[in-house]
Amino acid sequence: LYGVSCPSVGMCMGVGVSDATLAERYLAPIVGGLSPESGPVAGGNTVTITGSYFVAGSSVKVNATSSPSVTYVNSTELKAVVPAAAGPGKVNVTVTEQGITSAGVPADVYTYQALPSARRSAPGERSAHR
């Protein structure tokens, strides 16, 4: 049987589970970094989220929009597809598991970048593409 015994606040002991498993089940996920830290407004790229206390079934939101695909790698790494954004800017990436959401920290900031605009050559200007 699995169980948790809490004789007092802050002193819980698991029966039949490791300390790491207890931590993963009862501690809020922590986002420690993103790679890459930026991408296109169109989304669609995959970001690697590193941190602590991730579990299989975690969900990821980028600026409150759910990622269309999240892959659990291990308790310290997730991979998530970035959804599209309305425009460029900095947003937070959060991880939620079992109703507990990671706190906003500087390490969870993702930057949506504007698409480069096409530049036309001025009359008489030589094009770099020949």
Image (spheres, helix red, strand yellow):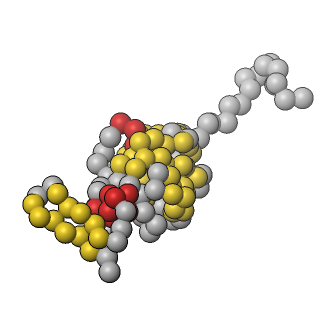
- State the image coordinates of residue 112 (x, y, percent, origin top left): 49, 43
Residue depicted at x 36% and y 68%: 17
Q: Between residues 55 and 9, which one lies in front from this camera angle? A: 9
Residue depicted at x 41% and y 42%: 32
Q: Is residue 50 left or right of 24 when viewed as pictured?
A: right
Count every numbered label the image shows and give the total: 0
Residue 87 showing in the rendered view: no
Q: Is residue 24 left or right of 81 when viewed as pictured?
A: left
Q: Between residues 81 and 10, which one lies in front from this camera angle? A: 10
- State the image coordinates of residue 22 (x, y, percent, origin top left): 32, 62
Q: Between residues 37 and 111, which one lies in front from this camera angle? A: 37
- State the image coordinates of residue 111 (x, y, percent, origin top left): 47, 40
Residue depicted at x 43% and y 47%: 51
> In the rendered image of this protein, does residue 62 appear above or below residue 90?
below
Q: Is residue 61 left or right of 35 when viewed as pictured?
A: left
> In the rendered image of this protein, does residue 11 appear above or below residue 125?
below
Q: Quadrant of the N terminus?
A: bottom left
Residue most extreme to the left: 8
Residue 130 showing in the rendered view: yes
Residue depicted at x 81% and y 25%: 127
> In the rendered image of this protein, does residue 118 appear above or below residue 29?
above
- State the image coordinates of residue 11 (x, y, percent, origin top left): 17, 57
Residue most extreme to the bottom: 1
Q: Quadrant of the C terminus?
A: top right
